[in-house]
Amino acid sequence: MNLESKIYDRTFANCLMNASGVKCMTFDELEVLRTAENGSFITKSCTLQPREGNPSPRYIDLKLGSINSMGLPNLGFDFYLDYVLNENNRNNKNVFFSLAGLSLEENMEMLKQIQNSDFKGLVELNLSCPNIPGKPQTAYDFDRTKVVLEEVFSLYKKPLGVKLPPYFDMVHFEMMAEILNKFPLKFVTCINSIGNALFIDNETVVIKPKGGFGGIGGAYVKPTALANVRMFYKLLRNDIAIIGCGGVENGRDVFEHLLCGASMVQVGTQLMKEGTDVFHRLILELKEIMQTKGYKNIEDFRGSLKEL
Ligand code: RRO
Protein backbone atom coordinates (compact mmCIF):
# COMPACT_ATOMS: atom_id res chain seq x y z
CA MET A 1 0.00 0.00 0.00
CA ASN A 2 1.20 3.47 -0.91
CA LEU A 3 0.44 6.77 0.87
CA GLU A 4 2.34 8.95 -1.62
CA SER A 5 0.69 12.22 -2.55
CA LYS A 6 1.41 14.99 -5.05
CA ILE A 7 1.24 18.76 -5.03
CA TYR A 8 2.40 20.64 -8.14
CA ASP A 9 5.55 18.86 -9.34
CA ARG A 10 6.36 17.35 -5.94
CA THR A 11 5.74 13.84 -4.72
CA PHE A 12 5.58 13.37 -0.95
CA ALA A 13 6.36 10.00 0.66
CA ASN A 14 3.07 10.26 2.57
CA CYS A 15 0.26 12.80 2.89
CA LEU A 16 0.99 13.90 6.48
CA MET A 17 2.70 17.01 7.79
CA ASN A 18 2.48 19.38 10.75
CA ALA A 19 0.25 22.44 10.78
CA SER A 20 2.32 25.61 10.84
CA GLY A 21 2.77 26.84 14.40
CA VAL A 22 2.91 23.43 16.01
CA LYS A 23 6.34 22.16 17.07
CA CYS A 24 8.13 24.03 14.30
CA MET A 25 9.43 27.25 15.85
CA THR A 26 12.87 26.33 17.20
CA PHE A 27 15.84 24.57 15.63
CA ASP A 28 15.36 21.54 17.90
CA GLU A 29 11.65 21.25 17.09
CA LEU A 30 12.35 21.44 13.36
CA GLU A 31 15.07 18.80 13.62
CA VAL A 32 12.56 16.40 15.22
CA LEU A 33 9.95 17.09 12.53
CA ARG A 34 12.49 16.76 9.74
CA THR A 35 13.37 13.20 10.75
CA ALA A 36 9.92 11.90 11.83
CA GLU A 37 7.53 9.81 9.68
CA ASN A 38 5.61 12.75 8.18
CA GLY A 39 5.82 13.19 4.39
CA SER A 40 6.71 16.86 4.77
CA PHE A 41 6.92 19.67 7.31
CA ILE A 42 6.36 23.40 7.51
CA THR A 43 8.07 26.12 9.54
CA LYS A 44 6.35 28.42 12.05
CA SER A 45 4.85 31.46 10.34
CA CYS A 46 7.51 34.15 10.51
CA THR A 47 7.98 37.88 10.38
CA LEU A 48 11.08 39.80 9.23
CA GLN A 49 12.12 40.46 12.82
CA PRO A 50 12.00 37.91 15.65
CA ARG A 51 8.91 38.25 17.90
CA GLU A 52 8.20 37.27 21.49
CA GLY A 53 4.47 36.92 20.81
CA ASN A 54 1.65 37.43 23.30
CA PRO A 55 1.88 36.95 27.10
CA SER A 56 1.33 33.46 28.60
CA PRO A 57 -0.71 31.43 29.19
CA ARG A 58 -1.36 31.58 25.45
CA TYR A 59 -2.01 27.93 24.43
CA ILE A 60 -4.29 25.55 26.34
CA ASP A 61 -5.25 21.96 25.51
CA LEU A 62 -9.00 21.38 25.86
CA LYS A 63 -10.90 18.13 25.98
CA LEU A 64 -12.15 18.65 22.44
CA GLY A 65 -9.23 20.58 21.02
CA SER A 66 -7.21 23.65 21.87
CA ILE A 67 -7.36 27.41 22.14
CA ASN A 68 -4.41 29.67 21.34
CA SER A 69 -3.43 33.26 21.09
CA MET A 70 0.29 32.83 20.53
CA GLY A 71 0.64 36.18 18.72
CA LEU A 72 3.13 34.98 16.11
CA PRO A 73 6.18 34.26 18.27
CA ASN A 74 9.03 33.31 15.93
CA LEU A 75 12.80 33.47 15.53
CA GLY A 76 12.65 35.82 12.53
CA PHE A 77 12.84 35.35 8.78
CA ASP A 78 16.64 34.92 8.52
CA PHE A 79 16.61 31.92 10.86
CA TYR A 80 13.88 30.06 8.90
CA LEU A 81 15.37 30.93 5.49
CA ASP A 82 18.68 29.51 6.65
CA TYR A 83 16.92 26.39 7.97
CA VAL A 84 14.99 25.64 4.78
CA LEU A 85 18.03 26.35 2.57
CA ASN A 86 19.96 23.77 4.59
CA GLU A 87 17.10 21.33 4.09
CA ASN A 88 17.29 21.95 0.33
CA ASN A 89 21.05 21.31 0.52
CA ARG A 90 20.30 17.94 2.12
CA ASN A 91 18.46 17.21 -1.12
CA ASN A 92 14.94 17.74 0.20
CA LYS A 93 12.92 20.19 -1.93
CA ASN A 94 9.65 19.12 -0.30
CA VAL A 95 9.68 21.60 2.58
CA PHE A 96 7.10 24.32 3.23
CA PHE A 97 8.14 27.81 4.39
CA SER A 98 5.36 29.75 6.16
CA LEU A 99 5.31 33.56 6.02
CA ALA A 100 3.08 35.93 7.97
CA GLY A 101 4.40 39.45 7.58
CA LEU A 102 2.59 42.13 9.59
CA SER A 103 2.08 44.17 6.41
CA LEU A 104 2.07 43.61 2.66
CA GLU A 105 5.42 45.41 2.47
CA GLU A 106 6.89 42.96 4.96
CA ASN A 107 5.58 39.96 3.01
CA MET A 108 6.99 41.43 -0.20
CA GLU A 109 10.42 41.95 1.38
CA MET A 110 10.51 38.32 2.58
CA LEU A 111 9.29 37.01 -0.80
CA LYS A 112 11.91 39.09 -2.63
CA GLN A 113 14.66 37.53 -0.54
CA ILE A 114 13.29 34.01 -1.10
CA GLN A 115 12.93 34.64 -4.83
CA ASN A 116 16.60 35.74 -4.96
CA SER A 117 17.80 32.79 -2.86
CA ASP A 118 18.37 29.16 -3.81
CA PHE A 119 15.14 28.13 -2.03
CA LYS A 120 13.52 25.20 -3.83
CA GLY A 121 10.59 24.44 -1.51
CA LEU A 122 7.04 25.79 -1.36
CA VAL A 123 5.88 28.96 0.39
CA GLU A 124 2.64 28.93 2.42
CA LEU A 125 1.59 32.55 2.78
CA ASN A 126 -0.51 32.87 5.93
CA LEU A 127 -3.46 35.19 5.22
CA SER A 128 -5.37 34.15 8.33
CA CYS A 129 -3.60 34.72 11.66
CA PRO A 130 -6.40 35.61 14.11
CA ASN A 131 -4.26 36.65 17.07
CA ILE A 132 -2.45 39.90 16.40
CA PRO A 133 -4.20 42.72 18.26
CA GLY A 134 -5.23 45.41 15.77
CA LYS A 135 -4.52 43.28 12.64
CA PRO A 136 -7.51 41.80 10.81
CA GLN A 137 -7.33 38.40 9.12
CA THR A 138 -6.46 39.38 5.55
CA ALA A 139 -8.47 36.64 3.86
CA TYR A 140 -11.74 37.85 5.42
CA ASP A 141 -11.28 41.02 3.32
CA PHE A 142 -11.87 39.89 -0.28
CA ASP A 143 -10.73 43.10 -2.00
CA ARG A 144 -7.58 43.22 0.09
CA THR A 145 -6.79 39.57 -0.66
CA LYS A 146 -6.93 40.32 -4.39
CA VAL A 147 -4.56 43.28 -4.00
CA VAL A 148 -2.17 41.18 -1.92
CA LEU A 149 -2.13 38.33 -4.46
CA GLU A 150 -1.63 40.74 -7.38
CA GLU A 151 1.45 42.17 -5.65
CA VAL A 152 2.74 38.77 -4.57
CA PHE A 153 2.55 37.18 -8.01
CA SER A 154 3.97 40.24 -9.77
CA LEU A 155 7.21 39.45 -7.94
CA TYR A 156 7.24 35.84 -6.78
CA LYS A 157 7.66 33.10 -9.38
CA LYS A 158 8.39 29.99 -7.28
CA PRO A 159 5.61 27.66 -6.01
CA LEU A 160 3.34 29.38 -3.49
CA GLY A 161 0.04 28.70 -1.76
CA VAL A 162 -2.07 30.48 0.86
CA LYS A 163 -3.37 29.50 4.28
CA LEU A 164 -7.02 30.46 4.60
CA PRO A 165 -9.28 31.07 7.56
CA PRO A 166 -12.53 29.08 7.78
CA TYR A 167 -15.49 30.42 5.81
CA PHE A 168 -19.08 29.78 6.85
CA ASP A 169 -21.19 31.12 4.00
CA MET A 170 -21.63 29.72 0.48
CA VAL A 171 -21.32 33.18 -1.05
CA HIS A 172 -18.01 33.69 0.73
CA PHE A 173 -16.66 30.38 -0.60
CA GLU A 174 -17.62 31.45 -4.11
CA MET A 175 -16.19 34.95 -3.77
CA MET A 176 -12.88 33.70 -2.43
CA ALA A 177 -12.62 30.91 -5.00
CA GLU A 178 -13.24 33.37 -7.83
CA ILE A 179 -10.31 35.48 -6.62
CA LEU A 180 -7.97 32.54 -6.00
CA ASN A 181 -8.70 31.06 -9.44
CA LYS A 182 -7.21 34.17 -11.08
CA PHE A 183 -3.74 33.47 -9.71
CA PRO A 184 -1.04 30.84 -10.33
CA LEU A 185 -1.41 29.36 -6.84
CA LYS A 186 -0.14 25.81 -6.39
CA PHE A 187 -2.20 25.04 -3.28
CA VAL A 188 -4.49 26.44 -0.61
CA THR A 189 -4.46 25.26 2.99
CA CYS A 190 -7.87 25.05 4.71
CA ILE A 191 -8.27 25.89 7.58
CA ASN A 192 -6.49 28.04 10.12
CA SER A 193 -7.99 28.00 13.63
CA ILE A 194 -11.54 29.29 14.09
CA GLY A 195 -10.61 32.75 15.29
CA ASN A 196 -11.59 34.68 18.36
CA ALA A 197 -13.49 32.06 20.31
CA LEU A 198 -13.85 32.06 24.08
CA PHE A 199 -13.38 29.15 26.46
CA ILE A 200 -14.39 29.48 30.11
CA ASP A 201 -13.35 27.40 33.10
CA ASN A 202 -14.44 28.17 36.64
CA GLU A 203 -15.90 31.59 35.74
CA THR A 204 -12.58 32.54 34.13
CA VAL A 205 -11.03 32.65 30.69
CA VAL A 206 -8.17 30.19 30.10
CA ILE A 207 -5.65 32.24 28.11
CA LYS A 208 -4.27 35.68 28.95
CA PRO A 209 -4.11 37.66 25.66
CA LYS A 210 -7.11 39.58 24.30
CA GLY A 211 -9.35 38.96 27.32
CA GLY A 212 -9.26 35.19 26.70
CA PHE A 213 -10.21 35.25 23.01
CA GLY A 214 -8.25 32.82 20.83
CA GLY A 215 -8.21 30.47 17.85
CA ILE A 216 -9.84 27.08 18.26
CA GLY A 217 -8.34 23.88 16.85
CA GLY A 218 -8.92 20.15 17.23
CA ALA A 219 -12.14 18.12 17.22
CA TYR A 220 -14.27 21.27 17.56
CA VAL A 221 -13.26 22.40 14.08
CA LYS A 222 -13.30 19.18 12.04
CA PRO A 223 -16.73 19.64 10.38
CA THR A 224 -15.84 23.23 9.46
CA ALA A 225 -12.43 22.13 8.14
CA LEU A 226 -13.95 19.36 6.01
CA ALA A 227 -16.54 21.77 4.61
CA ASN A 228 -13.82 24.22 3.60
CA VAL A 229 -11.64 21.50 2.04
CA ARG A 230 -14.65 20.17 0.12
CA MET A 231 -15.92 23.52 -1.14
CA PHE A 232 -12.51 24.71 -2.32
CA TYR A 233 -11.82 21.32 -3.89
CA LYS A 234 -15.01 21.78 -5.91
CA LEU A 235 -14.62 25.47 -6.71
CA LEU A 236 -10.91 25.87 -7.45
CA ARG A 237 -9.09 25.06 -10.70
CA ASN A 238 -7.90 21.49 -10.54
CA ASP A 239 -4.23 22.48 -10.69
CA ILE A 240 -4.65 24.14 -7.27
CA ALA A 241 -4.17 21.41 -4.65
CA ILE A 242 -5.91 21.51 -1.28
CA ILE A 243 -4.04 20.93 1.96
CA GLY A 244 -6.50 19.92 4.67
CA CYS A 245 -6.03 21.08 8.25
CA GLY A 246 -8.36 20.82 11.21
CA GLY A 247 -9.50 18.22 13.68
CA VAL A 248 -7.20 15.36 12.73
CA GLU A 249 -6.97 12.98 15.69
CA ASN A 250 -7.03 9.57 14.02
CA GLY A 251 -6.74 7.75 10.71
CA ARG A 252 -10.40 8.20 9.97
CA ASP A 253 -10.03 11.98 10.18
CA VAL A 254 -7.14 11.84 7.68
CA PHE A 255 -9.23 9.59 5.43
CA GLU A 256 -12.15 12.07 5.53
CA HIS A 257 -9.92 15.03 4.61
CA LEU A 258 -8.62 13.03 1.63
CA LEU A 259 -12.14 11.98 0.67
CA CYS A 260 -13.11 15.67 0.60
CA GLY A 261 -10.26 16.30 -1.83
CA ALA A 262 -7.18 17.16 0.24
CA SER A 263 -3.80 16.15 -1.20
CA MET A 264 -1.87 16.65 2.04
CA VAL A 265 -3.25 16.66 5.58
CA GLN A 266 -1.79 18.78 8.38
CA VAL A 267 -1.89 17.89 12.06
CA GLY A 268 -1.96 20.66 14.66
CA THR A 269 -3.61 20.17 18.05
CA GLN A 270 -3.07 16.40 18.12
CA LEU A 271 0.63 16.84 17.25
CA MET A 272 0.87 19.27 20.16
CA LYS A 273 -0.75 16.69 22.47
CA GLU A 274 1.01 13.56 21.24
CA GLY A 275 4.30 14.64 19.67
CA THR A 276 5.65 13.34 16.37
CA ASP A 277 4.75 9.72 17.23
CA VAL A 278 1.29 10.77 16.05
CA PHE A 279 2.43 10.40 12.43
CA HIS A 280 3.30 6.71 12.87
CA ARG A 281 -0.10 6.01 14.43
CA LEU A 282 -2.02 7.97 11.77
CA ILE A 283 -0.21 6.11 8.98
CA LEU A 284 -1.12 2.73 10.51
CA GLU A 285 -4.74 3.74 11.08
CA LEU A 286 -5.12 5.19 7.58
CA LYS A 287 -3.59 2.07 6.01
CA GLU A 288 -5.98 -0.10 7.98
CA ILE A 289 -9.00 1.82 6.66
CA MET A 290 -7.68 1.71 3.09
CA GLN A 291 -6.99 -2.02 3.42
CA THR A 292 -10.56 -2.70 4.58
CA LYS A 293 -11.96 -0.76 1.63
CA GLY A 294 -9.55 -2.23 -0.93
CA TYR A 295 -7.82 1.08 -1.73
CA LYS A 296 -4.15 0.79 -2.66
CA ASN A 297 -3.33 4.45 -3.31
CA ILE A 298 -4.66 7.78 -2.10
CA GLU A 299 -5.74 8.59 -5.64
CA ASP A 300 -8.13 5.59 -5.51
CA PHE A 301 -10.48 7.63 -3.30
CA ARG A 302 -9.22 11.20 -3.00
CA GLY A 303 -12.06 13.67 -3.63
CA SER A 304 -14.64 10.96 -4.15
CA LEU A 305 -16.93 11.77 -1.24
CA LYS A 306 -20.37 10.36 -1.93
CA GLU A 307 -23.40 12.66 -1.95
CA LEU A 308 -27.00 11.62 -1.47
O1 RRO B 1 0.84 32.64 16.30
C1 RRO B 1 -0.41 32.59 16.39
O2 RRO B 1 -1.03 33.15 17.30
C2 RRO B 1 -1.22 31.89 15.39
C3 RRO B 1 -1.07 32.07 14.02
BR1 RRO B 1 0.31 33.08 13.26
C4 RRO B 1 -1.99 31.44 13.14
O3 RRO B 1 -1.94 31.55 11.90
N1 RRO B 1 -2.99 30.70 13.68
C5 RRO B 1 -3.12 30.52 15.02
O4 RRO B 1 -4.05 29.83 15.47
N2 RRO B 1 -2.22 31.13 15.85
Image (spheres, rainbow, N blue to C red):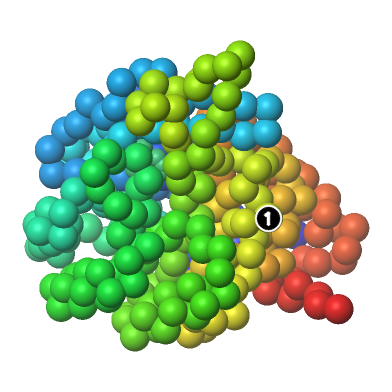
Instruction: Judge whether residue 296 can be spotted in this image.
Output: yes
Residue 90 place in picture, x, y as percent: 31, 47
Determine if the C-beta at disc 1 is less than 8 A from ligand 1. no
Packing grade of label 1 (10 A; few <14, some 14-19, many >=20) is: few
Image-based side of 127 in relation to 236, left or right? left
Farthest-out residue, front: 203
Work out whether residue 70 or residue 157 is closer to the camera in this orientation and state it: 70
Residue 165 place in picture, x, y as percent: 45, 57
Q: Quarter-wise, where is residue 113 in the image?
A: bottom left
Q: Which residue is mark 1?
A: 223
Looking at the rendered image, the quarter that the C terminus falls into is bottom right
Q: Would you place residue 12 above or below residue 63 in this image? A: below
Q: SS at mark 1? A: helix
Work out whether residue 288 or residue 248 is closer to the camera in this orientation and state it: 248
Residue 169 place in picture, x, y as percent: 56, 69
Work out whether residue 111 or residue 84 is closer to the camera in this orientation and state it: 111
Quarter of the rendered image showing ligand 1: top left
Q: Quarter-wise, where is residue 93 in the image?
A: bottom left
Image-based side of 268 in relation to 116, left or right? right
Residue type pointed to by label 1: Pro
